[in-house]
Image: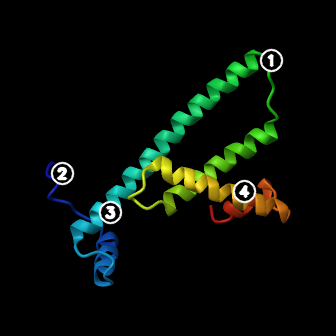
Amino acid sequence: MNNLQEITLKPELREFITNKIAQGKYQTLNEAINKGLELLKFQEEIYQGRFEDLQREIMLGVEASERGEVIDSKLLFSQLEKEKILTRIAFFLKPITLDKQTAIDQLRQTMDEISRKAIERGLTPEILEEILNEDE
């Protein structure tokens, strides 16, 4: 496919978009496809940004271990899991109009508050992970 004007959709995707247009969610096929591509672009930006963040975190960890500084593994994995959850939530909740960093900052604030309340009620990171992975 060399011409972007010639797009062939799978039947189930064509039906999905047709239904969304009929429901008034989108006005045209182009609008629906553009929205989908915006979401794909955002998802890839999140994954690339997270990958770069992880590379930096790994280097910091290597440097700290070389200096003899030890990090509690339970705390480290809890923080990494929290970041993973933030990234997942950012993808699903972020309006396209917000820039990535603003959306992540807002979600961090929300997740910190949720985490505080969850801990007060006895929800541990292990229980939360089990709940999040039930459908996988």
Kindly report the distance in space between the C-alpha atoms of the residues bearing marks 3 and 2: 21 Å
User: In what element is the residue under mark 3?
Assistant: helix
**Looking at the image, is mark 2 or mark 4 earlier in the sequence?**
2
Q: Quadrant of residue 67?
A: top right
**Looking at the image, is mark 1 or mark 3 earlier in the sequence?**
3
Kindly report the distance in space between the C-alpha atoms of the residues bearing marks 4 and 3: 31 Å
Which residue is under mark 3? 35
**Amino acid type shown at disc 2:** Met
- Residue 81 at x, y = what percent? 68, 48
Label 2 crowding class (10 Å Cα cut-off): few <14, some 14-19, many 20+? few
Kindly report the distance in space between the C-alpha atoms of the residues bearing marks 2 and 1: 55 Å
Q: Between residues 13 and 132, which one lies in front from this camera angle?
A: 132
Label 4 crowding class (10 Å Cα cut-off): few <14, some 14-19, many 20+? some
Residue contact at pointers 3 and 2, CB within 8 angstroms: no
**Looking at the image, is mark 2 or mark 1 earlier in the sequence?**
2
User: In what element is the residue under mark 2?
Assistant: loop
Which residue is under mark 4? 129
Kindly report the distance in space between the C-alpha atoms of the residues bearing marks 1 and 3: 49 Å
| Numbered tag placed on residue 68 in the rendering | 1
Most extreme residue toward the bottom is 23
What number of labels is visible? Answer: 4
- Residue 45 at x, y = what percent? 43, 45
Which residue is under mark 2? 1
3 relative to 35 in the view: left or right? left
Kindly report the distance in space between the C-alpha atoms of the residues bearing marks 1 and 4: 30 Å
**Looking at the image, is mark 1 or mark 4 earlier in the sequence?**
1
| Residue 72 vertical position relative to residue 106 in the rendered view, above or below | above
1 relative to 105 in the view: left or right? left
